[in-house]
């Protein structure tokens, strides 16, 4: 049997659905929402937001959020923060948006935790509260958001709201890296390379730098290139180092573009 609903959803997501099909899909979502499907309310809100019908979108997000749909709470929070929602909102309301991000976090939508944690850490657009920020970061990390794990790593490394602990920082960077957060992987690699907070392990650092370089992180390419140049964690190989520096240059690291090998040594051209 052909899954007509699935075809409609896929076409809409890919931008291929003609207007009549989009209208049909929205009608079906609204009907399902009226029957009590909070997921349909959320999806109707998303479709209306794509059409820039923000007030209608907010209404459906609110219904879904009231039904404990974390994604909908976060989507509504974004609209509330922008001030494009109907009464009782109607104008930018950071406090209300923060409460909605908290609801998203409570309902296990990890990115909602991270956004709220960032607001609380930076003190914008709501008052700073580092203790609360760390709490929602922890929940976000436990729910699987690698950015939340990285932000906890930074906090423990710098001693922001906690006693500095590079070992704990490394643990959080590792969790972030496992979640494919490249910034976490890069910092973890540096800690392995330099033995900061964890036992020095240049070979492991090289593996992490390689992963980052393959993901188009120019800094990771440069760091791995220097390891090949000096024979740390890998066999010394100037040709491989050249390739990595060239890769970093191609990605956009201007300093790497100025590196040249002369008589087996790297020099920086002016």
Image (cartoon, rainbow, N blue to C red):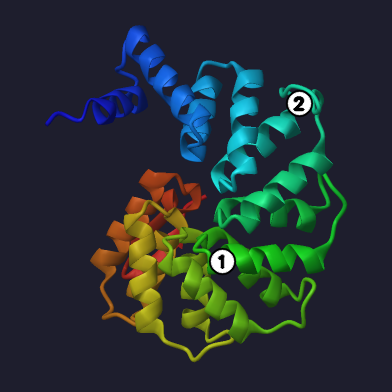
Task: Mark 2: give few (<14), some (14-19) or many (20+) Cα within 10 Å.
Answer: some
Q: Residue at x 34, y 82 (%)?
A: 203
Which residue appears farthest toward the top when viewing the image?
20
- Near-viewer residue (92 or 99): 99
Query: Which residue sits at x=52%, y=50%?
Result: 270
Identify the mark at residue 141; answer none if there is no mark.
1
The residue wearing badge 2 is 83
- Tell me if 154 is positioned left or right of 99 in this view: left
- Above-or-below relation of 240 to 125: below
| Relative vertical location of residue 80 with respect to residue 87 in this rendering, above or below | below
Marks 2/1: CA–CA distance: 29 Å
Mark closer to the chain start, 2 or 1: 2
Counting from the top left corner in percent of width and height, residue 32 is at 44, 29
In the displayed image of the protein, which residue is found farthest to the right?
127
Q: Residue furthest bottom?
A: 199
Residue 45 is at least partly visible in this image: yes
């Amino acid at each position: 049997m052909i899954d007509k609903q699935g075809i409609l959803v896929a076409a809409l997501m890919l931008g291929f659905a003609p207007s009549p099909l989009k209208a049909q899909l929205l009608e079906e979502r609204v009907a399902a929402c009226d029957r009590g499907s909070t997921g349909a309310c959320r999806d109707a809100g998303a479709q209306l937001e794509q059409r820039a019908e923000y007030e209608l979108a907010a209404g459906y997000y609110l219904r879904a959020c009231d039904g404990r749909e974390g994604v909908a709470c976060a989507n509504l929070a974004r609209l509330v923060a922008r001030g494009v929602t109907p009464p009782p909102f109607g104008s930018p309301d950071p406090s209300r948006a923060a409460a909605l991000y908290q609801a998203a976090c409570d309902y296990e939508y990890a990115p909602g935790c991270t956004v709220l944690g960032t607001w609380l850490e930076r003190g914008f657009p709501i008052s700073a509260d580092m203790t609360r920020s760390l709490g929602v970061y922890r929940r976000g990390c436990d729910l699987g958001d690698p950015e939340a794990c990285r932000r906890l790593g930074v906090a423990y490394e710098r001693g922001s709201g906690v006693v500095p602990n590079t070992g704990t920082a490394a643990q959080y960077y590792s969790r972030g890296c496992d979640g494919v957060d490249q910034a976490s992987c890069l910092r973890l690699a540096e800690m392995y390379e330099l033995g900061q907070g964890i036992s020095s392990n240049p070979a492991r650092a090289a593996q992490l730098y390689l992963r980052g370089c393959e993901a188009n992180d120019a800094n990771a390419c440069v760091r791995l290139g220097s390891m090949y140049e000096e024979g740390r964690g890998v066999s010394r190989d100037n040709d491989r180092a050249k390739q990595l520096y060239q890769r970093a240059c191609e990605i956009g690291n201007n300093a790497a573009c100025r590196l040249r090998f002369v008589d087996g040594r790297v020099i920086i051209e002016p």
